[in-house]
Image: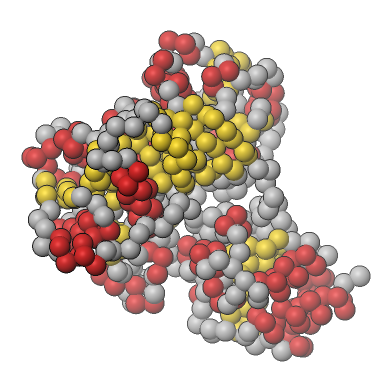
Amino acid sequence: MKKLNIVVLAKQVPDTRNVGKDAMTAEGTVNRAALAAIFNPEDLNALEMALALKSQIPGTTVHVLTMGPERAEEILRDSIFRGADGGTLLSGREFAGADTLATSYALTCALKKLNPDLVVAGRQAIDGDTAQVGPQVAGKMDLPQVTYAEEVVEIKESTLVIKRRLERGVETVECPVPAVITVNGTAPDCRPKNARRVMRYKNMPLTVWGAADVDPDMDQLGLNGSPTKVKKIENVVFRAKECKRMTGTDTEIEGMMKELIASHTIG
Amino acid sequence: MNSVFVYIELEGRTPAEVSLELLTKGRELATTLGVKLEAVVLGHGLDGIEKELQHYGADVVWVADDKELAPFRTLPHTSILCGLIEQEQPQIALFGATSIGRDFAPRVSAALKSGLTADCTELVIGDHADAKGNEYKNLLYQIRPAFGGNIIATIVNPERRPQMATVREGVMKREHAKGHGPAEVKAIDYKKWLRGEDLVVKIIDRHIEAREVDLKAAPVIVAGGYGVGSRDNFKLLYELAEMLGGEVGASRAAVDAGFTEHCRQIGQTGVTVRPHLYIACGISGQIQHTAGMDGSSMVISIDKDPDAPIHKIADYAIVGDMNEVLPKMVKYYKQNSK
């Protein structure tokens, strides 16, 4: 295969997996400031897949594209320390309030400028778990897509053979490039930061693009470009319920098991 | 009137469980709106497929039968469904939140520029007024957990059609539509929408495993969290589950820690279950987990932390060590069951 210009789509996300006690305010709302911002885990799997292709196909470059506030630069630099060649941040208030469709539109505008041969993204981000942006980007770019990719099994002249992890099995497909691949969390973990690269690239300038840099149709960006609207947000409140509290003594457990048997909850 | 579409996913030639659940919900929505419920089936060897679908209330079954359409591939299914949606203009289109639905529903939404809400836990018809004073009648309220499950959001698509949503398997109930007549079968004139380039991705090999762990059908689930401590300690859960005729489930933290397999994961990012009895061991009870089990008829929580949120939704809250409590449950079950 000829050298590829790969663009990895990545996102900086609040670490929703570690929502501790201080992550909720006294009123029961989410305290976003208390959540660490991390590299979305499956985007790291995607970066690794791209870097592995770079090492197998001479001349291949890996560029990381993200959309977010200024601090999202952190994951671009992190990517470069791990082996990426460069990064672009798409940032600006025009992009704010975007749902998945408006997000994928903005990313597509930027991708058209970067003109990739292959787009690789994580399957989904942990703050939304929608898994929509990858396929929506593929649709807007009119490129074939391979979702839930776990491994590039073979690199052929003009196609990639890719193993996909489905809910109940695996599927191997052959897909021509250019294409969009979304990578599953079961794919290999990303290589660590390289100390030499950290020294060398810690001050490397990154590209920051605003809306004007990517020639968008403004009606398709941000809140305006989002067909889905949030009607209502409810903070989750645990329901109160009549409850028997116990410490697990023999008498208590025996009583409980008898009640469960008597009520036919267990046979 | 603009109908309700349900995309029917196939396992071989059988409609998937989630699709029948969506037909049941779709029937309810269509009846509320006074419109038809229409099922869309794309596959091969589909003779008689309408029979099962009409039991669940489909008024119309759209069929495209071609060897290129099975097994599922993203591009052909996207092109045909987009064509049919543009032709028929449904107001709602529902998909399973499965490997298939989550793969191509976003692509369909991108092509049609319509909104898609992932992993809805509830779908209801209702009215909406926006901040500018525009009023909308009979929108689809798409209700889903967000932000790691710490909030529940109601999403609407006021302007664009169809209003699209995905729903996970096991979230909606499956029920025959009583007294529902035969469905009208309509052939989709799909060839005009199928492009040559839709066939560029080739399936080389495919292994679909029969479902080994069926959490959703289990009457009793013994679930373990990070607090179980090790893969070895999970053996106690298996022992109790087997004795009670149940299955072992797990929180995401326990799966991530490698205590048990991913297919046992319960919660927002795993399976949703509603057993008769749910025994939560060493699970703190964050909403990401409880979203997948709070429909259980009865809950026993076992956790050392007296303040663990799981105790608040339990019928029996045991503040203690599961390594001591589970053997007692086994012992007293044996003594008292017939």
Q: Residue at x 81, y 70 (%)?
A: A261
- The answer to whether residue A89 is visible is yes
Model colouring: secondary structure
Residue A58 appears at what percent x and percent y?
28, 40
Q: Residue at x 24, y 40 (%)?
A: A59
- Judge by depth and name the residue closer to the eye, B116 or A234: B116
Q: Residue at x 44, y 54 (%)?
A: A188
Q: Is residue A201 left or right of residue A22?
A: left
Image: B304 above or below B151:
below
Image: B194 above or below B338:
above
The image shows a total of numbered marks equal to 0
Seen as rendered, the residue at the extreme right is B338
Seen as rendered, the residue at the extreme front is A58
Q: Is residue B263 left or right of residue A195?
A: right
Which of the image's four quarters has the C terminus of chain B?
A: bottom right
Residue B302 appears at what percent x and percent y?
62, 78
- The answer to whether residue A46 is visible is no
Residue B169 appears at what percent x and percent y?
58, 45
- Judge by depth and name the residue closer to the eye, A169 or B170: A169
Which of the image's four quarters has the N terminus of chain B?
A: top left
Q: Residue at x 59, y 40 (%)?
A: B18
Residue A11 appears at what percent x and percent y?
28, 53
